Image (spheres, grey):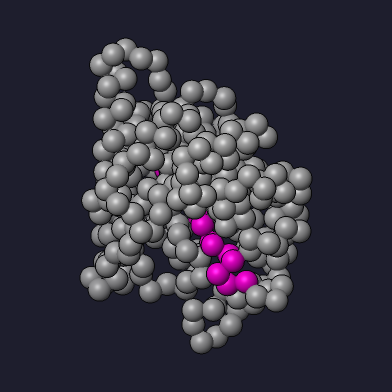
Amino acid sequence: MAFQEFMIAPVGAESLTHAVQLGSEVYQALKSVITEKHGASAIGVGDEGGFAPPITKPSEALDLLTAAVRKAGHGGKIEFAIDPASSEFYSEGKYDLGFKGKKPCQLSASGLADLYRSLMDKYPIILLEDPFAEDHWTAWRAFKKNCPIELVGDDLLATNIERIETAKEKDACNSLLLKINQIGTITESLEAAKKAFGYGWRVFVSHRSGETTDDFIADLTVALSTGHLKSGSPCRGERVVKYNRLMDIEDRLNVFGEPHEYAGVWMVKGKGIEYL
């Protein structure tokens, strides 16, 4: 499988705590679905707690997620997101979806864009991260022209002010993946977020593959009102601690009667509110 990550977004949850519950139940259902289809050997987890079953097509991964959502009884409450990490399989103007196997499957930028659109037509996808290589600006710009969903720059932007400005200039994306240790300091991270917000973009706070049990990015997510956090599966301690911290923050806001609202469907509709 060329694509790096497939994620779920519990947009139909009533609160942050409810969202964590939905995510956890779908995760356990996915474990069961994969076991039934591919056997117990297919449910080992990676650095971020995700499963890596023996599949080769994006549609297979999305079908597994769809089955897991259905099995968990949460149809209509869960949407999907994909991080292809396309720089990893881009070379000389082509994207090789078969780069991990023996048989190449090369697509042009327009061919890859058509694949994304076909997936968006079939599945409830609300976010794409790094759908094209980090310096393939023409592909990003062409795709964004008719892209109705959140288009996130990770490798494209590198939490770097200069690349954010270039992306705005080239009209390449509409969201920043914010990684603190990618740029180096809290100050620079806040400046990057401020720049992105100034452009009317969204900001998607993210963990790293090599994580610790520090939960600061949960606080950062709430402080910046970004509405969404990427922290991996509800599986490993260094991932779960972020979700626990978010629930703790929600708890405290409830206790002290502070106004707040879980982003949920508002993220899909693009409403401007104070997100939790």
Q: Does the magenta stretch include residue 83?
A: yes
Q: Quadrant of the C terminus?
A: top left
Task: Out of 79 and 160, give the one closest to the viewer.
Answer: 160
Q: Is 181 displayed left or right of 52 in the figure?
A: right
Residue 249, picture quadrant: top left
Residue displayed at 57% across by 26% down = 271
Q: Is 136 displayed left or right of 79 in the figure?
A: right
Number of residue marks: 0
Above/below status of 36 relative to 202: below
Q: Is 189 displayed left or right of 252 in the figure?
A: right
What stretch of residues is rendered in magenta? 77-90
Q: Position of residue 183 (x, y in %)?
A: 52, 50
Task: Out of 219 and 233, give the one closest to the viewer.
Answer: 219
Above/below status of 196 relative to 276: below
Above/below status of 107 relative to 68: below
Task: Out of 238 and 255, give the one closest to the viewer.
Answer: 238
* Residue lying furthest top: 257
Q: Is residue 242 magenta?
A: no
Q: Where is residue 76 in the image (x, y as percent from the top left)?
A: 43, 40
Q: Where is residue 4 in the image (x, y as percent from the top left)?
A: 47, 64
Q: Is residue 108 visible?
A: yes
Residue displayed at 31% across by 41% down = 215
Q: Can residue 28 be seen in this view?
A: no
Residue displayed at 68% across by 62% down = 135
Residue displayed at 62% across by 55% down = 156
Q: Where is residue 268 in the image (x, y as percent from the top left)?
A: 54, 36
* Residue lying furthest bottom: 102
